Image (spheres, helix red, strand yellow):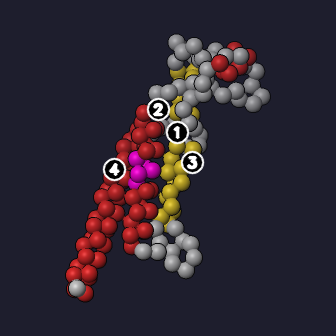
């Protein structure tokens, strides 16, 4: 794998990390009805749940080293859901709250999301510098040959 493709895979991973963190931050207050728990006899929330959208399911980026073929290099980033995806939160005024006044709130840690944004920022800058240095070095080599 070339230096350029390794750096661009890092740029793509950083971009994906920013998109996922932004989505999680934007939807941190998007609540919904608590999912029906198996074996529980809670008929109060069961009839309402289908009429209201579920709580936002937060996402996370899993980034691993790419190792394919004889020339490994770069990174691969995949998106998966956070588990558990929700926490019970008290909001008795919500129309979809259960008999205890609880709703499902996304399991989003804002401090972690802002750390992910900072990580993505510096990763993007570092990979952009690699591409810049690669381009300058290549241009210098071409000048020597001419």
Measured Cα–Cα span from mark 3 to mark 1: 9 Å
Mark 3, other Cα within 10 Å: few <14 / some 14–19 / many ≥20: few
Measured Cα–Cα span from mark 3 to mark 2: 16 Å
Does residue 105 lie above or below 62 as drawn? above
Pointers 1 and 2 in contact (CB under 8 A)?
A: yes
Q: Is residue 87 magenta?
A: no
Whether residue 112 is visible, yes or no, is no
Mark 4: secondary structure: helix
Measured Cα–Cα span from mark 1 to mark 2: 8 Å
Boundaries of the magenta span: 14-18
**Residue at x 22%, y 81% (from the top left corner):** 143
Measured Cα–Cα span from mark 2 to mark 4: 19 Å
Residue 90 is marked as none
N-terminal of the pair, mark 4 or mark 3, is 3
Q: Position of residue 114 (x, y in %)?
A: 36, 43
Mark 1 lies on residue: 58
Pointers 4 and 3 in contact (CB under 8 A)?
A: no
Mark 3: secondary structure: strand
| 68 with respect to 43 (left or right) | left
Mark 4 lies on residue: 118
Mark 3 lies on residue: 80
N-terminal of the pair, mark 2 or mark 4, is 2
Q: Position of residue 27 (x, y in %)?
A: 46, 32
- Residue 37 quadrant: top right
**Residue at x 45%, y 50% (from the top left corner):** 16
**Residue at x 33%, y 50% (from the top left corner):** 118
Mark 2 lies on residue: 27
Mark 4, other Cα within 10 Å: few <14 / some 14–19 / many ≥20: some
**Residue at x 23%, y 79% (from the top left corner):** 140
Measured Cα–Cα span from mark 1 to mark 4: 18 Å
């Amino acid at each position: 794998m070339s230096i350029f493709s390794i750096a661009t895979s890092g740029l793509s991973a950083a971009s994906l990390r920013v998109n996922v963190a932004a989505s999680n931050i934007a939807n941190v207050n998007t609540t919904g009805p608590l999912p029906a728990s198996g074996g529980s006899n809670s008929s109060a929330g069961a009839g309402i749940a289908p009429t209201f959208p579920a709580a936002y399911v937060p996402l996370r980026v899993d980034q691993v080293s790419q190792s394919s073929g004889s020339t490994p290099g770069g990174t691969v980033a995949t998106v998966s859901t956070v588990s558990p995806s929700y926490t019970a939160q008290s909001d008795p005024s919500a129309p979809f709250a259960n008999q205890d006044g609880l709703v499902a709130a996304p399991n989003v840690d804002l401090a972690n999301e802002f750390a992910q944004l900072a990580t993505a920022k510096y990763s993007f800058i570092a990979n952009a510098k690699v591409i810049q240095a690669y381009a300058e070095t290549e241009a210098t080599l071409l000048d020597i040959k001419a």
